[in-house]
Image (cartoon, rainbow, N blue to C red):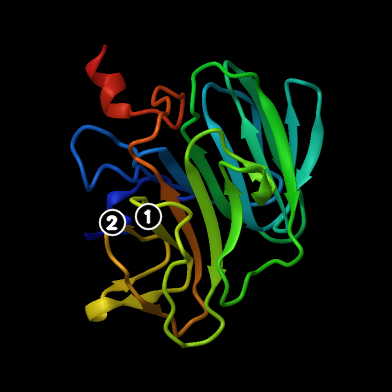
Amino acid sequence: MISKIDNAQKSGNSHIAILYPGTTTQTTDTGLGTIGRIDQANIPPGVTIKMHPHVNDEILSYFRSGKVQHTDSAGFTEFITPTKLMLMKAGKAFYHEEKMLNTGENMEGLQIFIRPAEKDAVPSVSFRDLAALHSENTWRLLAAPTADAGLQFTSQTWVYDFKAATTEAFGPPAYPKPNLMALLYVFRGSILGNGGLSVQKGESLVIKDESPFFRSDDAAELVLFLTDESSVFYDGGMFSGNKRQQMSSR
């Protein structure tokens, strides 16, 4: 099964495009397994997103341009850049502020809301320095349920990135375990897949039990998410939670 999610199926505004990846493939959950929500942001310098809460979300900040100052309720301050990723595990409750520094370019990147393995865990923040901005023609593991990735989710979730530096065909990486669901997100550029399937910037593919191949003529930048839908996770997070479930319980 390969299902395309186009840009018309996203919500948000001129600065943040919001993807709930389950809304086009199912009727009971706005997420896709452990993948709750993905925001593609394009925010000008000088903007500050004031101190705000997160509850039971694990948020991976993956920025490709700009520089952001993170400050949190524990009194910790650090900078997030295109080569410095942040994973914030909000747990029971955690507050943070994001300030877009004046670097002469917009902050463009993804904020990825992953569902935790359990409710109300102890909050924590961790960072990972990347050796290079891009991973050309190679899938780079950014975060995983195991410590070897540098950033560790509590749930069965894997995130990779890839830049198509040639026009040669490529496929997804070898999966870490069988029976995983994949979400392939086009961050920049475009790709062509099996049968001439075209996927543009901001669009994505849900892939299950398929071995697709792709090509790119414009050096596409891709982010790949893998999730074990049958694993244990908490789907009541503030941003990562199942919005259909929350609305039906009111």
* Left or right relative to 220: residue 205: left
Image point (71%, 32%), residue name: 125
Is residue 230 depicted above or below 61 in this figure? above
Crowd tier of the residue under label 2, counting other residues whose Cα lies within 10 Å: few below 14, some 14–19, many 20 or above: some
Camera-side residue: 70 or 142? 142
Q: Which residue is mark 2?
A: 208
* Residue 239 at x, y percent in the picture: 45, 30
Q: Position of residue 237 (x, y in %)?
A: 45, 24
- The extreme top residue here reads 250
> Residue at 73% across / 20% down in the picture?
73
Q: Earlier in the sequence, mark 1 or mark 2?
A: 1
Callout 1 touching callout 2 (CB < 8 Å): yes
Q: Where in the figure is residue 235, as x and y percent of width and height? A: 39, 26
Q: Could you tell me the amino acid type at mark 1?
A: Ala
- For mark 2, give the secondary structure: loop
Residue type marked 2: Lys
